[in-house]
Image: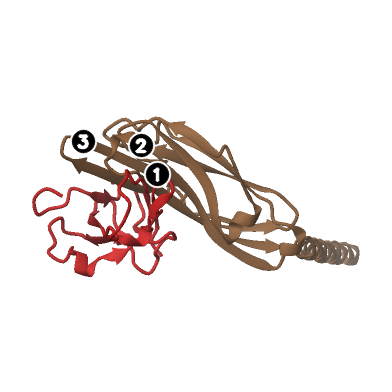
Amino acid sequence: LPGDGTAYNVSSSLLSNVNVDVTIKGADLVSGANKIGVGNVTWASSSTANDAGMIPASSISLSTDYDIGNKLATNLAGGEASHFRFWIDIPSGQVAGNYVGNFTQLCAQAA
Amino acid sequence: MKTIALKCFCLVFFLFSFSFVSSAVGVGVSPSRINLEVEAGKVQELEFLVFNIGDKPIDIYLKAEGDISQFTIVDPVTLTIEPEPTPHELPIKNGKTFKVEFVPKKSMSGKSYSGTIVAIGSSGSASQFGGNVGVASQVNIAVVSPVEKSSVSASMVMAIVAGLVIIFLIGFLLIKKKNSAGKRR
């Protein structure tokens, strides 16, 4: 990302009248018959855009199921945002190509 | 018994901003949580209002996840939904309704099932990432047997009949007492 900040954020709309939790899952990145496992993609989030704690060393691997143990945001009220960053670790020897994958962020009413 | 968290909108507004490309994807659903009691072998239909608070029309699909997915039917599965006019305000103007049917088999009676009805919208080609964003409505369903339902109904009928009999007897005694008092005069 350019600069020190992160431009990616997820926020709860002011229309919402419940607090929400946000979880995340992903899928493998695929290029033809080649793939990069989704676990090579890691993320970190913070309520602060430029939080110094959002670094690879403290990041969490994406998985194919919603990671309810590591929520991207917890108890987010209407109007509040959570900022996040992604990293990808390309295994050595990975075949060059245009790899495509996706991630899904899901919000649900906080418990 | 049905409990709905009234007017509970669960929204997420997902903002991508990178270099010259900027796109917002947001999906909302109402209700955000529901508790139901469904009779085994019967159909319980519910409606979920899904709306788009992003800045472009998006295809949103609905699916059931968790324990409830084995007896849940969603119709339609996918709809294209226009964004809500800005500033966003209630009531929702461009949202669309998905019908969801819960059809637990008779063998499922006596158990509770939980899961989510998930509405997923894709950020599409406007985003740097192939990301999706979604909202989940939490659903808890207690499946009861027809016997339980009918026994409850039978006991209610019995209670009503007993009440009527008591009222009739009291009335009868009062009239009798009044008549005998009149004869004495």
Mark 3 packing: few (<14 Cα in 10 Å), some, or many (20+)? few
Q: Is mark 2 on a helix, strand or loop?
A: helix
Amino acid bearing label 3: Val
Cα–Cα gap, marks 2 and 3: 12 Å
Q: To which quarter of the image does residue B148 belong?
A: bottom right
Q: What element carries label 1?
A: strand
Q: Residue furthest left?
A: A3
B88 versus A26 height, above or below:
above
Q: To which quarter of the image does residue A77 belong?
A: bottom left
Cα–Cα gap, marks 1 and 2: 17 Å
Note whether residue B9 is visible: no
Residue A82 vs residue B68: left or right?
Answer: left
Q: Nearer the viewer, mark 3 or mark 1?
A: 3
Residue A39 vs residue B113: left or right?
Answer: left
x and y percent of residue A93 in the render? 30, 58
Amino acid bearing label 1: Gly
Q: The red chain is which one?
A: A
Give me the residue at 28% from left, 32% from top.
B86
